Amino acid sequence: MPKAVFLNIYRDLRERIEDGTYGYQEFLPSENELTQEFSCSRSSIRRALGMLAQDGYVQAQQGKGVRVIRNPAIAKREGYIGLETFNELAGRCGFSPRTEPIICEEVVADEELAQLTGFEEGSRLAHILRARYADGVAISTDDSYYLAEAVPGLTPEVVAHSVYAYLEGTLGIRIATSRRVITIEAASDTDSRILDLNGLNAVGVMRSHAFDADGIMIEYTESHQKPGFFAFSETALRPAH
């Protein structure tokens, strides 16, 4: 399944904003100019711009164009942006990333696991626990469950590289939406054993459900993050009145 055209446009424009090609508070080229440059339909440009707006990169101004509202100098101090992967976060923030698979197995969802993840009881799930390192420091764990029939072939090698790169690049699955709940909780024994907490007794916890372009739930993940490193950046859109 080929990648959607608008995703490539989104990533290209996002990179230009990050590297300063389109500066903070400047306007992007017009829709007509972008349509000609990328040899695509106007709808593809609009979808790409819509994703950039949702992720806090740009804001449309009626009658004027689309203005860059993301300042890369400030953004380097932010945490995760939108549906950013760990490797993408590392590239933006300038640290050396490493992912270490701890568990890679297939399980069947019992009643308790079904309630936790949102997958139906009896579903075959690929279960992955991995530790994340930034410049050699263990800063987070991701405990994930994927619908096995939709995400076949997950191996420790895939996990160590990038699960999302495998989903998008190999399987052609586009993760479109994620619903997240973020809390601060007492560190568990597992947190204290794996993470470099340096005596801290609490972690940031993010529980998320990810859905593909068809609205099918693909993933449930519970991430435990080291305080001081953990941050999550969200762009809030106030409804028009």
Image (cartoon, rainbow, N blue to C red):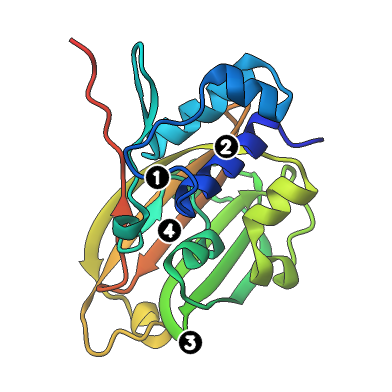
Structural crowding at the residue carrying mark 3, measured as other residues with C-alpha within 10 Å and reported as few (<14), some (14–19) or many (≥20): few
The residue carrying mark 4 is: 222
Closest to the camera, between mark 3 and mark 2, is 2
Query: Disc 3 to disc 2, how far (Cα)?
Result: 31 Å
Image quadrant occupied by the C terminus: top left
Q: Nearer the viewer, residue 164 or 77?
A: 77
* Sooner in the amino-acid sequence: mark 3 or mark 2: 2
Q: Residue at x 51, y 28 (%)?
A: 29
Image quadrant occupied by the N terminus: top right
The residue carrying mark 2 is: 10
Q: Nearer the viewer, residue 132 or 221?
A: 132
Mark 2 near mark 4, Cβ–Cβ under 8 Å?
no
Closest to the camera, between mark 1 and mark 4, is 1
Q: How many marks?
A: 4
Mark 3 near mark 2, Cβ–Cβ under 8 Å?
no
* Sooner in the amino-acid sequence: mark 1 or mark 4: 1
Amino acid carrying mark 4 in the image: Glu
Q: Residue at x 74, y 24 (%)?
A: 39
The residue carrying mark 1 is: 23
Residue 145 image point, x, y percent: 57, 54
The residue carrying mark 3 is: 136
Residue 79 image point, x, y percent: 35, 59
Q: Is residue 60 left or right of residue 74?
A: right
